[in-house]
Amino acid sequence: MSNENSRLKNIKALREKKGWTQEKLAQEAGISYQTLIKIEHGGIKNPRIETLIKIAKSLDSPLDKLVEYE
């Protein structure tokens, strides 16, 4: 599994753990819904660090949790 896929899987898993939809996370993070979809589905392979920070904060998760690898 590539590093990007691990990161994307972690974002989705953390989002689902909170019981949030993609729309809810996008809204909470202040990013577009389409951007979040692309990140989760691999359309954006290397999201900007600023975007990852927004997602991590919204999920109440340390940034390094988003980039853990299996």
Image (spheres, helix red, strand yellow):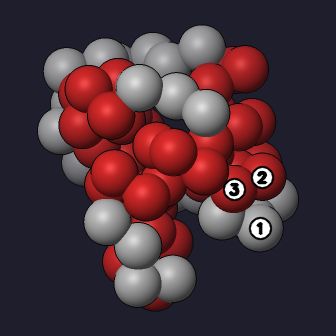
Residue lying at 50% horizontally and 72% vertically, measured from the top left: 14
Q: Amino acid at mark 1?
A: Asp
Q: Residues within 10 Å of mark 1 (few under 14, many from 20)?
A: few
Dot 2 falls on a residue whose secondary structure is helix
Q: Amino acid at mark 3?
A: Ser
Q: Is 1 positioned to the left or the right of 18 in the image?
A: left
Q: Residues within 10 Å of mark 3 (few under 14, many from 20)?
A: some
Quadrant in the rendering for residue 50: top right
Q: Position of residue 30 (x, y in %)?
A: 61, 33
Q: Residues within 10 Å of mark 2 (few under 14, many from 20)?
A: few
Residue under pointer 3? 58
Is any atom of residue 2 visible in this view?
Answer: no
Residue lying at 75% horizontally and 36% vertically, measured from the top left: 53
Dot 1 falls on a residue whose secondary structure is loop
Residue lying at 46% horizontally and 43% vertically, measured from the top left: 26
- CA gap between label 3 and label 1 equals 5 Å
Assess whether mark 3 and mark 2 are in contact (beta carbons under 8 angstroms): yes
Q: Is residue 12 above or below residue 3?
A: below
